[in-house]
Image: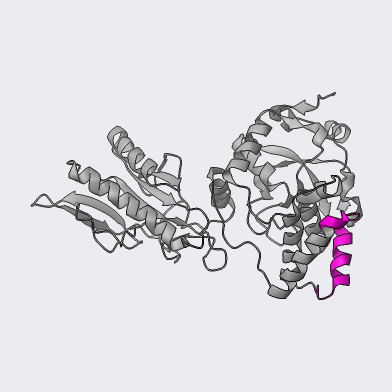
Amino acid sequence: MQYSNIIPLQEVANMSNSDLSSTFIRPAVYGHLGCDWSDAPLMITLKDIQSEDTDINVGRPEEHSTLEGQQLADSYAKGLNVWENSLPIVTPNTEPNAKFKYDLKAGFGTIQALLANGVKKFPFWVVTGTKEQLLRVSSLENTKDLLTVSFPTGEAGIVHHFKVLLSLGVKLDTEEKIDYKLQETWPGLNAVVKGRVKAEIIKLVKDGVKPRKYRTFAKVKVDQWLSQSADMVAQFRHGGQYDPNRDRIGYCTKNALDPFINAVKKYNETGHRSYVVFHVNAPSINSSLKDKRQALLDQLTSYEDSFHAMGMQFFPLDVLGFMAQDTENEDMRKLVDVDGNPIETSVFRDVRKSMQSKANWPADYRFGDIITPYLDANGIVQHEVRVGIPVDSRSV
């Protein structure tokens, strides 16, 4: 079948092997890296691929931002641009009893864009090679334009490649070794660019820098984490979905107002309480991860206080926990509390320590049990702590 330069995603998913072979050309830009490539792209179901954008995306110094993710999703909604010749790349997972058949090596943003558009399967190039050869594929995928333009950008991608090499134990203690590694992946690199990059790499070798430390989340990334990394206890619902195991409606967001308002609305409509899982932006010099988390809880408590002052006596929203975001100090399989400690139970209490609420909310909330607010005989809001059902008796 003959296809135009832009193929609707639904048509892409229905392409035959012969269609794939005749439509897509193996990208020549990777030819010098020493990997073995499939003769043609292979149609693969996305759920068979380990594709969560963690440090396995060694080709990018930073994750795609929420805006970049939305722009990619909008672009793919119009169809696949065949002329770009940029299908994502996977390698077979050879680990025994592996959960996934393939590991993604290039195209993390593409996968997120496809998931956002409801795509279930898509064509991928399948490559095999050594760990370092596959690293070079990942790095070149994000920096290949450096070889084709006069005044290129994206030099941070090359520096990040060398960060990962150092983390793998590759010796880069001489300029000759650095030059050799640059030539392996970026032959013919612009001399001016090469000089700037080498200076950064030499500084990197001297100072010692670790790969990306903090993760950030958007809806698609939350879905990927739940399906690929989260343990059984950490499973939750979001986007206003009902969670039958907790008898609550779930939300996941980085602001406090939306889940508060939605919880009130949903309780009025359904009689079900809600919970929220929070995540925050990466920390800065002036605001640590804990500061940002605590600020959300303080903000939520301030809303409760304000509504209580206007006569509201019941607040149908609990905090289930926070997404783990510190890759060095937090268990990335679990939800965590404000301090980054893993939450080991599938039910919860929230942590709001810094503000004394006019609604008589306890000053020291602890994760671990569901809170059910109620009015005592004096008309004061109190909390009945309901011990949760044991984890092993729940289906998640």
Identify the residue at horizontal 85%, vertical 61% (top origin): 182
Residue 110 visible from this viewpoint = yes
The mark tally for this picture is 0
Left or right of 175 on screen, residue 203 = left
Left or right of 134 on screen, residue 342 = left
Among the 4 quarters of the image, the one containing residue 113: top right
Q: Which percent across, then down, holds residue 288?
A: 47, 63
Q: Nearer the viewer, residue 297 or 27?
A: 297
Residue 392 visible from this viewpoint = no
Q: Residue furthest left?
A: 378
Identify the residue at horizontal 18%, vertical 45% (top origin): 309
The scheme the figure's colours follow is: one colour
Identify the residue at horizontal 80%, vertical 54% (top origin): 137
- In reply to whether residue 186 is colored magenta, the answer given is yes
Instruction: Say above or below: 226 vs 55.
Output: above
Q: Which percent across, then down, holds residue 72?
A: 66, 38
Instruction: Say above or below: 311 vs 385.
Output: above
Q: Which percent across, then down, holds residue 29?
A: 87, 47
Q: Nearer the viewer, residue 344 or 315?
A: 315
State whether the magenta stretch is mostly helix, strand or loop.
helix
- Quadrant occupied by the N terminus: top right
- In reply to whether residue 253 is colored magenta, the answer given is no
Among the 4 quarters of the image, the one containing residue 40: top right
What segment is highlighted magenta in the picture?
Answer: 171-193
Among the 4 quarters of the image, the one containing residue 82: top right
Q: Which percent across, then down, holds residue 48?
A: 68, 47
